Amino acid sequence: MQYSGEITVLPVAFESLGVRSMCTYIETPEVKVLLDAGVSLAPNRYGLPPHPREYIALKNRREEIIRFAEKSDVITVSHYHFDHHTPSYTDWAYNWCSAEIAEKIYKGKIILAKSFKEYINFSQRRRGWLFAKTSGSYAERFEIADERTFSFGCTQISFSKPVFHGPEESDLGWVLMVTVKYKDESILFAPDVQGPMSQETLNIIIESRPKMIIIGGPPTYLADFRMRVEDINFSLENLKTIVKHVPDVILDHHILRDENWESVIKPIVERAASLGHKVFTAAEFLGEENQTLEAYRKRLYSNEPPSEDFLKWSKLPSPKRRLIPPPL
């Protein structure tokens, strides 16, 4: 989809498209960029493993990621969660990945990735190191991107300082935001800032003055469980501030894991509309229906019971399940 002028923006994999991801393709006349080429499913939701329809979405979105990767010049990695990068090992149970798939995605590309040595927690430090040694080895060039700008003709790809993955001092660590700017047009990609929940991150977003932002909302489904309600509410208020300053907002990711996501974002959508601004999910931006499959997993199991073969596979030990694709 042509966003405006000469920048093309295409969401590739998101919660509104049935999977955990924020993978987005951006093209200018000079460079083709794939942001955060990862995808995954929640291992357990409502005490249930992913439904077959989620696996169909996972397979389809993975194929789309491969397709867009093959035409891209640059692939970015904002942080080392598996819904934001593709590891080089076999896992059909949650990430639909393998060494062959990783090579297809990253081979011959310019990889611009978050540092795996600084502003990173232990688990992501290990994942980042492994990524550099495996998927990174397929690249034409592997660059640490923190606080750097890369120029491709009149196009600039600029990375923020590491910002918090959610609330300040979050155990989940830090992520990089990315701005793709061509002439006077700019798109800001803000994965996993969760609203944002950090005042400093909000300030960076507002000061950037993007024409469009692609942002992950807060995980409202975790309120009072793994996330403080105060942080959730602060995040939702910050989103009202963002839609005041940014004309077009793609709001997706964590917030769409909540079965009541539409009512949660309604005040944000209304605030935007009152200013002549727009809020979309990734699916809505593409003109498609929302497929928030994880949020409706319990309902899917009730309305569309899986086959006996699938249920038998789903009860295998996790290490074995990762090595055997599910029967779909």
Image: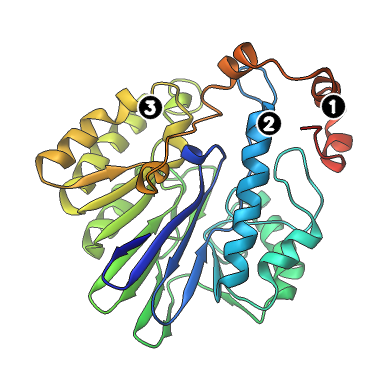
Name the quarter where the N terminus is drawn.
bottom left
**Residue 140 image point, x, y percent:** 66, 82
Q: Is residue 51 above or below residue 8?
A: above
Name the residue rendered at 23%, 36% in the picture.
269
How far is the residue under mark 3 from the one under mark 2? 21 Å
Residue 120 - label: none
Q: Which residue is mark 2?
A: 43
Mark 2 or mark 3, which is nearer the start of the sequence?
Answer: 2
Q: Is residue 186 shown left or right of residue 39? A: left
Q: Is residue 157 shown left or right of residue 60? A: left
Q: Residues within 10 Å of mark 2 (few under 14, many from 20)?
A: few
Q: Which residue is mark 3?
A: 261
Q: Is residue 289 shown left or right of residue 234? A: right
For residue 39, say whether it is visible.
no
Residue 313 - label: 1
**Residue 6 image point, x, y percent:** 31, 73
